[in-house]
Amino acid sequence: KAAPRGITVGTAVAQMSYDGFAEYALAAADKVFVVPVPTAQVVALLTSGLTASIALDQLGQLQPGKTVLVTAAAGGTGQFAVQLAVLAGCHVVATAGGPDKVALVRSLGAHRVVDYKQERLQDVLKAEYPKGVDVVYESVGGDMFEACVNGLAQSGRLIIIGMIENYSKGWPASKFEGVPEKLLWKSASLCGFFLLRYAGLFRQHLSKLLMLVATGKLKVALDVHSQRFVGIDSVAEAVAHLQSGRSSGKVVVQLAQHLPPASCLAMPVMNAQSSL
C-alpha cells in the first residue's frame, strides 16, 4: 500500500496506539501522521496536548468569562488545559502540590492556583467561587474528584480524563455516594474522555497546537528529570517517577540515543522543576 502524501524515508511520524514501549515498530502507513521533528516537546503535544485540546473543544464547550477548574495542572496534560482555557478567555482555577509546581502553573497563566498541600480545594471553592465552576478538567480521582463534583456550578460539566490516584493501586473501582443526585440537582453533567476514541480529530488539533507553540502562545513544560530517561531500560523508572506525584510537566522516555535538537522547531520549552 502506497504511503500517504508527504511521507518518505526519513520523515518524522507519530502513531497513537495501545502498543507499549518499543525501539522499533511496524505501523500501517495510513495510521501515522507527520510531525515536524521527533522531539520530547512534540511527544508532549501528542497524548497530553491532544487530550486537553480535543476534550475541552468537544466536551468543555468553553466560552469567554466561564470559570474552568484544572486538577493536576502541573502535569503532562494539565499544563495544556490551563493554557488553552486561558486562551479561550476563561477564568482558570488550578490545583498543584508544592511551591515549584504552583510557580509553574502560575507562569502558564492560571488566575488562582490552589496548593493542595496547604489548602483544601473544597474550602477554596466554597469561599471564593460560591456559584461553582462551569467546567472541570479532572485527572486525579479520589477526594479531588469528589470536591470537583461538589464545586460544580448549575449546568456545569466535569470531564474525566484520568484518575492517577488509582493507577498505582491497580485501578480499583471508584465508589462515590450521592453523585447522581448532585448532578440532577444542578442539571450538571459528567463526561468521560478517552483520547483514542477521537482519532479522526488528531491531525486537526495537532496542527492547531503546533501553530500555537510556533507563535509563542503555548508553552511546553518538560519534567526536568526526563533527561535521565533514555533507552528502553529506563521505562520502569520513568513510570514510577510519573506515579510518585513528584513529576512536574511532561515525563518523556527517549528510546533512541540521539535526536534532532528542539531548535529545529520554533518551540518555547520550559524545564519544569519538580519538588524532588
Image: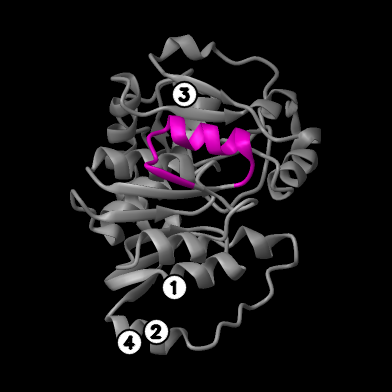
Q: Nearer the viewer, residue 17 or 69?
A: 69
Report the amino acid beneath label 1: Val
Label 1 sits on residue: 149
104 vs 258: above or below: below
Separation (CA) of disc 4 from disc 2:
5 Å
Badge 1 density bin: few <14, some 14–19, many ≥20, Cα 10 Å: many
Q: Is residue 82 one of those drawn in magenta?
A: no
Q: Earlier in the sequence, mark 4 or mark 3?
A: 3
Badge 4 density bin: few <14, some 14–19, many ≥20, Cα 10 Å: few
Q: Nearer the viewer, residue 102 or 213?
A: 102
Task: Answer whether labels 1 and 2 touch (C-beta < 8 Å).
Answer: yes
Tag 1's secondary structure? helix
The residue positioned 55% from the left and 38% from the top of the image is 102
- Residue 14 showing in the rendered view: yes
Residue reaching furthest front? 127
Label 4 sits on residue: 184
Label 3 sits on residue: 12
Q: Nearer the viewer, residue 60 or 39?
A: 60
Report the amino acid beneath label 2: Lys
The residue positioned 33% from the left and 75% from the top of the image is 189
Task: Answer whether labels 4 and 3 touch (C-beta < 8 Å).
Answer: no
Q: Earlier in the sequence, mark 3 or mark 2?
A: 3
Q: Nearer the viewer, residue 103 or 210?
A: 103
- Residue stretch rendered in magenta on the structure: 97-113
Location of residue 36 (image quadrant): top left
- Residue 28 showing in the rendered view: no
